[in-house]
Image (cartoon, rainbow, N blue to C red):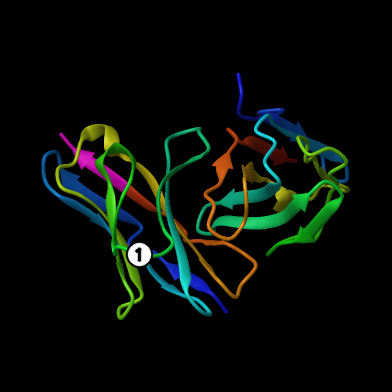
């Protein structure tokens, strides 16, 4: 069965520092991986996805994510955090042999001024 | 404005009542989804639809009914609401399923008393 794990409920980062939000997954076949962000009282917004190709994927708002097949990970990164990056971040995964997309439980990112 | 809308945004109902949550999208996306978001569980898929008149169960379908007579609408009905169905419900759409990102509505906060 496919699954996705976000091991940290909350991540605190000082403004200007690099940030990483972790995600690991388990799927049948090749993975399709997504990151979404949720601001308070809003729906989720798509940030980026990995389907195939380059392991480093660039997305919206300066975010990027690195696909690591051997570690089955897809960590979200940003070189320099902004206070406005504070939000809830979800990793999602679907295997090419599976018919459902599974979301992680989310990681709350706090950027400290 | 184009996009995906949900109504109502907030709803309070009593145990045993029937409740319908509405979802409308203007992109002519083929796929539509219903999720519930609960603390500690992240997002869980309730039902999804690949096209008009085609629906399928997700992870937590019990107690819910969906229909899709038109591509743009995907209502979710709680036939006899229970307190465990108190949650925030999100509708989403996408142009495809395998590698396509989803676009989320603003959510409906439902409280069952």
Where disc 1 sits, the SS reads loop
Picture residue at 88% right of the left edge, 48% below the top: B79
| Residue B10 found in image quarter | top right
**Would residue B89 be seen by someone viewing this image from the given angle?**
no
Specify whether A6 is left or right of B99.
Answer: left
What residue lies at 18% left-to-right and 47% top-to-bottom?
A13
Magenta run includes residue A112: yes
Q: Which residue is mark 1?
A: A53
**Camera-side residue of A14 and B81:** A14
Number of numbered tags placed on the structure image: 1
Compared to residue B66, the image places residue A97 above or below, namely: below
Label 1: how many Cα within 10 Å (few below 14, some 14–19, many 20+): few
Main structural element of the magenta stretch: helix, strand or loop? strand
Vertical position of residue B49 compared to residue A54: above or below: above
Q: Quadrant of the N terminus of chain A?
A: bottom right
* Chain bearing mark 1: A
Name the residue at 36% across, 58% down.
A9
Q: Position of residue A41 (x, y in %)?
A: 50, 32
Q: Magenta segment, which residues?
A: A109-113
Residue B84 in view in this figure:
yes
Residue B20 placement: quadrant = top right
């Amino acid at each position: 069965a496919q699954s996705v794990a976000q091991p940290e409920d909350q991540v605190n980062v000082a403004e200007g520092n690099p940030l990483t939000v972790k995600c690991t997954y388990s799927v049948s076949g090749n993975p399709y991986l997504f990151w979404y962000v949720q601001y308070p009282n809003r729906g989720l917004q798509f940030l980026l996805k990995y389907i195939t190709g380059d392991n480093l994927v660039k997305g919206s708002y300066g975010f990027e994510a690195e696909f690591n097949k051997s570690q089955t990970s897809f960590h979200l990164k940003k070189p320099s955090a902004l206070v406005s990056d504070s939000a809830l971040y979800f990793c999602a995964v679907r295997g090419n042999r599976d018919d459902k997309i599974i979301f992680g439980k989310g990681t709350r990112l706090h950027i400290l001024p | 404005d184009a996009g995906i809308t949900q109504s109502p945004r907030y709803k309070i109902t009593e145990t045993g009542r029937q409740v319908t949550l509405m979802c409308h999208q203007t992109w002519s996306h083929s796929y539509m989804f219903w999720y519930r978001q609960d603390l500690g569980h992240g997002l869980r898929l309730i039902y999804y639809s690949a096209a008009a008149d085609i629906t399928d169960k997700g992870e937590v379908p019990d107690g819910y009914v969906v229909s899709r007579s038109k591509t743009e609408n995907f209502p979710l009905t709680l036939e006899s609401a229970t307190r465990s169905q108190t949650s925030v419900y999100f509708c989403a759409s996408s142009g495809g399923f395998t590698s396509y990102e989803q676009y989320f509505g603003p959510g409906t906060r439902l409280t069952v008393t």
